[in-house]
Image (cartoon, helix red, strand yellow):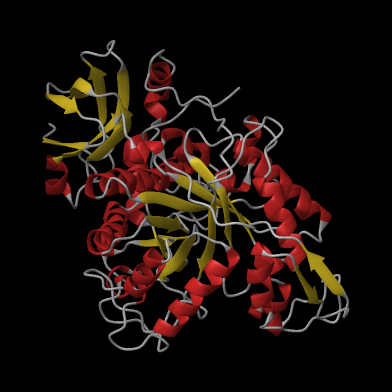
């Protein structure tokens, strides 16, 4: 039995009421069918993840080479890591410029990439690491971790802590200020750059024992009537933390929609271990249970345009190969009128094995459904022989020995994607013949909800939340429930829930007039929803 769809933060004391609303016929436009019709052969998303820990787009010369390599491969999109750990490989009003000495003074890597990629007919997606903001090394004085790390007092501490009190460099989405800061970083970039998309990455917890920021615990206890510190495996606490991650994703999606309606919001999502074999098995997967990332629900609600599951599985290990196949089969049949691009870990595989994974990813499922395409990790390490991590060990279990680093194998890979090719294996000395997977250039699949929208959205703020910044003991707008009821569309009802700052939002609304009411109060307002737009609402709560 499929779990009811969730479009708000769960509340244990009201879940029965909420589910009854969710199951009401005509709840909102039909998204129940997860199947996506086969894509025409003239469109397919073909991209590289270009990380900022390696060469790729840090100089004008690197950007020029990146575009040439992508063209040689018949790729049509670049997903570039412009936020590594709370730093900016672009001009930001919020975060410090990267301290990477490989970036020339005065050079804007993102702008140069946009200019050259767009001239070549390619999309640019700004890949931004979401919650981790530090991984060691020197930090500028204006870095968020310097101001809001674990040593900051009281509410100014935004750090995600483990149950034992360790801070490991993540901001906690259960802290309202940390969530708003993170969303603001994305929106600032959108206002400044003509990107085709922004990508969430590491938008999750580090594990089930993460998320113990004091402010987050206080909010959970306030909303559930609890006291003390919840256990990591407490089902209510696990769901509450999932909801915090989803709330961040929702807020970004709706606010991005208001700023630039055509920009695509994507997410690099976890696909560890074995893939689910049916709907119910989703709730046993590692993304859902371990890192509290319910990305299937994001697709179902429509608050991401594309998921890019990171299916980093080694083809030469039978169990991992099987896990890869299970994940891609599930993905093909669970897109919910959004899109999925499979993300093979080509850096873990031999060239011909990655080509095989791409073929299987792009083939139809048993039900005849296709994903939108593939995105390869990574541009810098395209195969086993250019995997820089193996230089420091870990190659002993490879089936071909001895391993050696071959930087030229990156060029072999770019060519092999688009042309019949051959290469001499670095370990065996044997010649390996390959056939292309991207033999001809193609366009990027349309997203009709972006290009030809027929539905609208709302976003609003319960303004009195701001005056209660330092108190969670009294009744606040944090977690307030709202009811949105259509006046002229068959009285359809949607339940919403405010986040830690009193913000609320909803998408996929049929155009028309609605009544929005704050539950438990007399406060209500008439709202007009327009296709392709976000209607902004501001009112108080008492």
Quarter of the view holding residue 178: bottom left
**Residue at x-position 29% and y-position 69%:** 152
Quarter of the rendering occupied by the N terminus: top right
**Residue at x-position 73% and y-position 67%:** 351
Side (left or right) of 369 relative to 350: left
Side (left or right) of 21 relative to 389: left
Q: Position of residue 399 (x, y in %)?
A: 86, 70
Against 72, residue 453 (above or below) is: above
Quarter of the view holding residue 437: bottom right
The outermost residue toward the top is 490
Observer able to see residue 484: yes
Side (left or right) of 476 relative to 345: left
Against 138, residue 288 (above or below) is: above
Against 439, residue 55 (above or below) is: below
Q: Position of residue 263 (x, y in %)?
A: 33, 50
Against 164, residue 493 (above or below) is: above
Quarter of the rendering occupied by the C terminus: top left
Observer able to see residue 89: no
Between 283 and 468, the one nearer to me in the picture: 283
Q: Position of residue 447 (x, y in %)?
A: 42, 41
Quarter of the view holding residue 537: top left
Between 215 and 187, the one nearer to me in the picture: 187
**Residue at x-position 46% and y-position 42%:** 237
Q: Position of residue 472 (x, y in %)?
A: 24, 45
């Amino acid at each position: 039995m499929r779990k009811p769809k969730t479009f708000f933060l769960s509340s244990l004391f009201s879940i029965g009421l909420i589910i009854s609303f969710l199951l009401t016929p005509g709840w909102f436009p039909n998204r129940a069918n997860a199947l996506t019709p086969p894509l025409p052969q003239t469109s397919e998303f073909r991209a590289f993840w270009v990380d900022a820990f390696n060469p790729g787009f840090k100089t004008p010369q690197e950007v020029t080479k990146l575009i040439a390599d992508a063209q040689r491969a018949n790729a049509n999109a670049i997903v570039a890591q412009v936020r590594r750990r709370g730093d900016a490989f672009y001009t930001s009003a919020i975060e410090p410029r990267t301290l990477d000495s490989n970036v020339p003074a005065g050079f804007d890597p993102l702008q140069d990439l946009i200019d050259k990629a767009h001239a070549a007919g390619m999309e640019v997606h700004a890949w931004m690491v979401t919650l981790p903001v530090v991984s060691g090394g020197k930090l500028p004085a204006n870095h968020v971790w310097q101001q809001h790390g674990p040593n900051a007092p009281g509410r100014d501490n935004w750090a995600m802590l483990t149950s034992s009190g360790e801070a490991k460099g993540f901001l906690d989405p259960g802290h309202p200020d940390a969530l708003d800061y993170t969303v603001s970083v994305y929106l600032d970039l959108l206002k400044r750059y003509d990107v085709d998309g922004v990508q969430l990455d590491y938008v999750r917890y580090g594990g089930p024992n993460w998320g113990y920021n004091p402010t987050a615990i206080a909010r959970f206890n306030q909303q559930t009537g609890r006291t003390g510190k919840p256990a990591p495996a407490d089902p209510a606490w696990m769901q509450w933390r999932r909801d915090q991650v989803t709330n961040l994703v929702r807020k970004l999606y709706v606010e991005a929609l208001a700023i630039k309606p055509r920009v695509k919001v994507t997410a690099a999502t976890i696909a560890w271990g074995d893939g689910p074999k049916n709907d119910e098995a989703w709730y046993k997967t590692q993304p859902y249970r371990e890192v509290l990332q319910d990305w299937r629900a994001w697709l179902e609600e429509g608050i991401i345009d594309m998921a890019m599951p990171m299916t980093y599985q080694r083809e030469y290990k039978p169990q991992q190969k099987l896990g890869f196949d299970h994940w891609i089969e599930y993905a093909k049949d669970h897109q919910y009128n959004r899109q999925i691009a499979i993300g093979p870990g080509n850096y873990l595989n031999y060239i011909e094995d990655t080509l095989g994974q791409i073929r299987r990813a792009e083939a139809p499922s048993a039900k005849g459904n296709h994903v939108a395409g593939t995105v390869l990790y990574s541009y810098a390490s395209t195969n086993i022989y250019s995997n820089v991590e193996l230089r420091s060990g870990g190659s002993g279990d490879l089936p071909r020995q001895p391993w050696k680093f071959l930087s030229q194998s990156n060029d072999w890979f770019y060519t092999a994607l688009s042309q019949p090719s051959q290469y001499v294996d670095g370990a065996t000395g044997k010649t390996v013949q390959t056939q292309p997977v991207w033999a001809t250039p193609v366009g990027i699949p349309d997203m009709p909800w972006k290009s030809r929208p027929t539905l609208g959205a709302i976003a609003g703020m319960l303004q009195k939340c701001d005056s209660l910044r330092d108190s969670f003991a009294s009744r606040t707008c944090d977690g307030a429930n709202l009811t949105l009821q259509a006046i002229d569309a068959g009285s359809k009802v949607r339940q919403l829930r405010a986040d830690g700052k009193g913000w609320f939002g909803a998408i996929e609304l049929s155009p028309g007039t609605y009544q929005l009411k704050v539950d438990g109060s007399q406060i209500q307002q008439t709202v007009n929803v327009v296709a392709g737009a976000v209607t902004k609402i501001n009112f108080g709560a008492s």
